[in-house]
Amino acid sequence: MKRALMVAVLLVLAGCGSAEKSDDGSKARSDQEKGSAMVGDCSATSDQVTSAKTLVSADLDGDGTPEAVKLTTPGGDCSTTLFAKLGEGYVATAVPTEPPATGAFAVDPGTGGQLVVTRADHPRGGYQLRIYVASADELTELKVDGQPLLPFVASDVQEHPWSIDCSADGLVFTEAVAHEPIGVVPAWDVKQTTYTVDGTTVTKGATKEIADNVLAQDLEAKYPALVEHSAFESCRAS
């Protein structure tokens, strides 16, 4: 009888061990599943994520099917997070809260996945464009020396005329800078720089001057795209 009791105790203990192991395994699988469905610091099923506004549709991975690129609201665990679902997971990045991004458009540079360009209007005038590119597991803003690729556009003064467009060599940024040496009347020098995008990395090429000593009153007639701050006129996808 004692022997039978010992066997029963051992069976109970073994069963507990198996249950504990099974529970641990289930918990690990559950944690792994949760980890693969995160948007920034939020679960993909959180209210902040599921209620996020769609800014634009863009074919981020170049497979021919556009993804909905959404933006969460300010505050919470994933404040102003730009994200999209790619495959079984999500790519995401936090964007500045002030000023908030209010719109976006897609750009097709002809090299695979499309870029996303957001626009944030400043309450005191002007706006900022930011360019984002996706890899298989992240969404990244294109920056040069830690700053947005495109300068802030002031609405009250023509302080920095510029434009950007696509080319076979990359993204071509054209700008007008104050002519040097300063003459009797204001004038501009027009310069051009090509940026190459490789994955989520942008590399600045050499800058060349394409026009010298353009009078201020002639700039709009000769280079209207700079005065208008034209952005990706030839390669907008949406």
Image (cartoon, grey):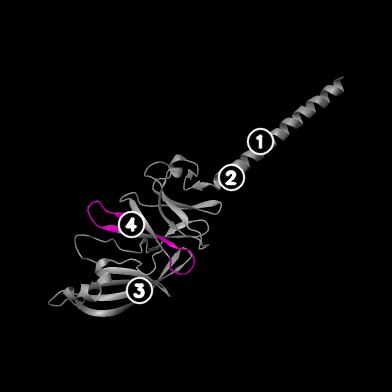
Q: Residues within 10 Å of mark 3 (few under 14, many from 20)?
A: some
* CB within 8 Å, label 1 to label 3: no
Q: Is residue 108 left or right of residue 88?
A: left
Mark closer to the chain start, 4 or 2: 2
Q: Amino acid at mark 1?
A: Asp
Q: Residue at x 62, y 39 (%)?
A: 27
Q: Dot 2 lies on which element? A: helix
* Quarter holding residue 104: bottom left
* CB within 8 Å, label 2 to label 3: no
Q: Is residue 86 above or below residue 187?
A: above
- Give the magenta range: 108-127
Front position in the image: 199 or 121 = 121
Tell us which disc is closer to us: 1 or 4. 4
Q: CA distance from mark 2 to mark 3?
A: 45 Å
Rendered location of residue 38, percent (x, y)? 51, 46
Mark closer to the chain start, 1 or 2: 1
Q: Dot 3 lies on which element? A: strand
Q: Is residue 103 above or below residue 75?
A: below
Q: CA distance from mark 4 to mark 3?
A: 22 Å
Q: Which residue is mark 3?
A: 193
What numbered label is drawn on residue 33?
2
Rendered location of residue 55, percent (x, y)? 39, 53
Tell us which disc is closer to us: 1 or 2. 2
Q: Amino acid at mark 3?
A: Thr
What numbered label is drawn on residue 119?
4
Q: Within the magenta stretch, is there residue 99?
A: no
Q: Which residue is mark 1?
A: 23
* CB within 8 Å, label 1 to label 4: no
